[in-house]
Image (spheres, rainbow, N blue to C red):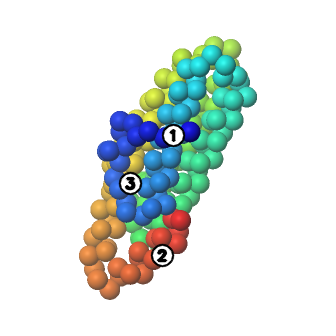
Amino acid sequence: MEQKPRIGLDYIAFTGIPGIDSQHSELIFMLDAFTDNLKKDDTDADFIYNSMDGILSFMKSHFVTEEKLIEMMGFTKITDHKAQHKECIELFLKELKTLNEKDFTKAKLIQFIRAFRDTAIVHFSISDGDYVNYMEKLLSGRGKRDSIVSNARAVAV
Ligand SMILES: [Fe+2]
Ligand SMILES: [Fe+2]
């Protein structure tokens, strides 16, 4: 399936670390593709559950990668950053539980996914942007530059 850029991706901070940047874009594409599919009549409960589960797994693995990276950098706001990741996961898990509720509707799920997409964009832009700034400051200290870049690539790829 062809992936088209959508509004929002322009605002994501580019870390310059290929693995991280592609994970950010991929997660937004996954959310968009899911919304598109939810608008079709033939999406059944299994498809919805599997899609949500797939997005959740992808998001968790992105957060694990990123947390390794920011730990390695000695990012000063790591506790807060990890808490934000945890909050995103909890938000998604809470929505996953609503799939079995009587008053579940696709319209409500679409609304959630749209809002969640905004939350993700804000996190990638502002909070991830924060560690990008931190990393750039570290990179300007010449001695550390090479080891940070090579370690970061090893973690993120
Ligand atoms: Fe991220
Ligand atoms: Fe993050």
The answer to whether mark 2 and mark 3 are in CB contact below 8 A is no
* Other-residue count near label 2 (Cα within 10 Å), few / some / many at <14 / 14–19 / ≥20: few
Q: Extreme bottom residue here?
A: 143
Q: Give the distance between the C-alpha atoms of the residues marked 2 and 1, in whole angstroms.
A: 32 Å
Q: Earlier in the sequence, mark 3 or mark 1?
A: 1
The residue identified by callout 1 is 2
What amino acid is at disc 2?
Answer: Asn
**Mark 1 and mark 3 in contact (Cβ < 8 Å)?**
no
- Cβ(mark 3) to ligand 1 < 8 Å? yes
- Which quarter shows the N terminus? top right
Look at the numbered disc 2 and give the secondary structure of its residue: helix
Residue receiving disc 3: 128
| Residue farthest to the front, as pictured | 2
Residue at left offset 63%, top offset 16%: 41
Q: From the viewer's perspective, is residue 5 above or below residue 110?
A: below
Q: Position of residue 76 (x, y in %)?
A: 37, 65
Please give the name of the residue rendered at 59% of the width and 41% of the height, measured from the top-left corner: 55
Q: Does the rendering let one see residue 79?
A: no
Three-letter amino acid code of the residue under disc 3: Asp
Quarter of the figure with residue 74: bottom left
Is residue 53 visible in this depiction of the protein?
yes
Residue 83 coordinates in the image, percent (x, y): 48, 50
Residue found at the very far right of the displayed protein: 46
